[in-house]
Structures are given as structure tokens and as C-alpha cells.
Image (cartoon, helix red, strand yellow):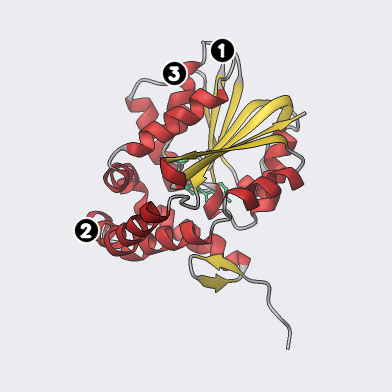
């Protein structure tokens, strides 16, 4: 029997191609309600996590920044606010529906200059090597089929002396919080998702994919394997999320 290569899609095992398809389905399905659900699920705390990540990135005013798996553009807006007129942010995502919602949001806010939009797979970023001063991926890596390949691609696109910032759900480090968080995520989130988006399955996937994502230490090792140096990990909200920062030197 030929053994097929499989990968996680939440708690299920699928072929890599099928996982990519299913992740595409999830985000096309929730795109229009994605921002509302983020605020409801996190009680708005995701805004703080994102702000803090941009604060840690501390880009120069003329930096060229790449927002990978940027979806509806929260990180792009925050970076754009920090940069001067000569800075540039590229909002990229593999999913056209998410990118369209992101572009419309930015245009509605009057953000026109210094932002570009690129439909792109994090595993094979279509940019010149060594061409970005900062790359971020927020709540995106978990959904990527081949994470190591994506880390390598992001490494290649960074200029020497620049950093990658990963903001992602991680492993809770406070036992009591972990128990409460499990109850909240498994019991409440899929129902909330069903109520707001009519799509319970996508929010079951969200909760499961968080549990399957590499923990802080494993992700640090993956960054080092991709070539990153000085990799630091910062737990936020007791490890519900973590920021990994790695430098290309
Ligand atoms: C949870 S959303 C995060 C959106 C945004 N960064 C934020 O923080 O709100 C995850 C995003 O990852 C995108 N994504 C999944 N796989 C991807 C891939 N291989 N390459 C690029 N984007 C991908 C999805 O389309 C989706 O927009």
C-alpha cells in the first residue's frame, strides 16, 4: 500500500492539497463576518495583541513592510499608521475574498497611498529576495499547509538586519487559565461562530487548529531551522498568544 502524505486540518488528517482547499473554504465562508467575530471572540483583546506586535516590530518610517496572510488588513493599517509617507506596506493573502474585504476596509478609511495588495501564498512569496525591512504574519501561520516552507520563504524575502514577527495562538502557560480557556473555546466559540456567520464548522476548525499549532519552543526551533537568529518568544495573555521575533543577520 502506498502511504499518503497527510497533514493536520484541525483534528483531521488530510492530504496537503485538501488542507489548502479546506482552509480556503473556511476563510471564503467567514470573510465578511471575520472582523466582527474577532472582536466578539477575544472581547477586543486581539487589537491589543496586534498593536503590541507592531510596537515590537518598530519599523523605520521609510520601511518596506510585508503583511503575510494579512486577510482583512488589521496589521497593514497599524503598520501604515506608523510609517511615514515614504514607507510602504504590502497586504498579501492567499484568499481573494479576505483580500477584497481588506482592500475595501482600507479604502473606506481613506488609506490609499503606500499600500499595495498582492494575492500570494506564504509558502512561495512572489517577491524579490532580500527586499523587505520587516515581515509580519498574524494569526496566519497556523493555517498554512507547509509552515517550514513558509518560514523559509519569509526568511528569503527579508533584508539582512531585518526581522520577522509572528503573532499566533500558542500554548497557555498558566494551568488554571488553560482549563478555563479550553472550556471557553470548545463550548462557546463554535456556537458563537454558528450564530454570527452560520458556519459552525469553520470555528470548530479554528479551535482545533490552535491546539495543533506548534508550541512556543517548537516554533522557535522551526524559525532557527529556517535560518533566523536571535529568536525571542513573548507570551501574551498567559500564552493564549505568543509573538516570535527572529532576525536575519
Ligand atoms: C485568521 S486569518 C488572519 C488575518 C489577519 N492577519 C488578522 O490577523 O486578522 C488567517 C489568514 O491566513 C490566510 N492564509 C491561509 N493560508 C495561507 C497561505 N498559504 N498563504 C497566505 N495566506 C494564507 C487566510 O486566507 C486568512 O486570511
Give how far across and how far down residue 199 sits, in percent: 31, 62
Q: Residues within 10 Å of mark 1 (few under 14, many from 20)?
A: some
Examine the rendered structure and indicate whether residue 13 appears above or below residue 225.
below
Q: Quadrant of residue 205?
A: bottom left
Q: CA distance from mark 3 to mark 2?
A: 33 Å
Q: Nearer the viewer, residue 32 or 13?
A: 13
Give how far across and how far down residue 82 sits, in percent: 48, 17
Exactly how many numbered labels are in the figure? Answer: 3
For the C terminus, the image quarter is top right
Q: Quadrant of residue 191?
A: bottom left
Examine the rendered structure and indicate whether residue 151 appears above or below residue 77.
below
Q: In the rendered structure, find residue 148 and report the number of the disc placed on it.
A: none
Check whether the beta carbons of the residues at disc 2 and disc 1 lie within 8 A of each other. Answer: no
The residue at 21%/58% (across/down) is 195
Which element type, helix, strand or loop, lies under badge 3?
helix
Check whether the beta carbons of the residues at disc 3 and disc 1 lie within 8 A of each other. Answer: no
Q: Residues within 10 Å of mark 2 (few under 14, many from 20)?
A: few
Examine the rendered structure and indicate whether residue 237 appears above or below residue 217.
above
Determine which residue is flagged by label 2: 195
Q: CA distance from mark 2 to mark 1?
A: 42 Å
* Mark toward the start of the polypeptide (2 vs 1): 1
Determine which residue is flagged by label 3: 81
**Residue 161 visible (yes or no):** yes
Give how far across and how far down residue 24 sits, in percent: 48, 57
Q: Nearer the viewer, residue 123 or 60?
A: 60
The residue at 29%/41% (across/down) is 39
Q: In the rendered structure, find residue 61 and report the number of the disc placed on it.
A: 1
Residue furthest left in the image:
195
Amino acid at each position: 500500500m502506498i502511504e499518503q502524505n497527510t497533514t493536520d486540518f484541525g483534528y483531521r488528517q488530510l492530504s496537503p492539497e485538501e488542507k489548502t482547499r479546506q482552509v480556503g473554504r473556511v476563510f471564503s465562508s467567514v470573510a465578511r463576518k471575520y472582523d466582527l467575530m474577532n472582536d466578539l471572540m477575544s472581547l477586543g483583546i486581539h487589537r491589543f495583541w496586534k498593536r503590541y506586535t507592531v510596537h515590537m516590530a518598530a519599523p523605520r518610517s521609510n520601511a518596506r513592510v510585508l503583511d503575510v496572510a494579512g486577510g482583512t488588513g488589521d496589521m497593514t493599517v497599524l503598520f501604515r499608521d506608523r510609517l511615514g509617507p515614504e514607507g510602504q506596506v504590502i497586504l498579501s493573502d492567499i484568499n481573494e475574498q479576505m483580500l477584497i474585504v481588506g482592500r475595501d476596509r482600507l479604502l473606506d478609511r481613506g488609506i490609499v497611498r503606500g499600500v499595495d495588495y498582492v494575492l500570494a501564498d506564504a509558502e512561495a512569496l512572489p517577491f524579490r529576495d532580500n527586499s523587505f525591512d520587516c515581515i509580519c504574519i498574524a494569526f496566519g501561520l497556523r493555517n498554512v499547509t507547509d509552515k517550514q516552507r513558509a518560514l523559509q520563504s519569509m526568511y528569503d524575502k527579508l533584508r539582512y538586519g531585518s526581522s520577522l514577527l509572528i503573532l499566533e495562538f500558542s500554548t497557555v502557560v498558566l494551568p488554571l487559565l488553560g482549563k478555563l480557556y479550553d472550556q471557553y473555546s470548545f463550548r462557546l466559540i463554535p456556537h458563537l461562530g454558528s450564530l454570527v456567520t452560520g458556519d459552525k464548522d469553520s470555528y470548530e476548525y479554528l479551535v482545533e487548529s490552535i491546539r495543533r499549532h506548534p508550541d512556543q519552543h517548537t516554533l522557535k526551533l522551526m524559525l532557527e531551522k529556517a535560518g533566523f537568529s536571535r529568536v525571542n518568544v513573548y507570551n501574551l495573555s498567559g500564552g493564549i498568544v505568543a509573538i516570535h521575533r527572529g532576525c536575519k543577520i
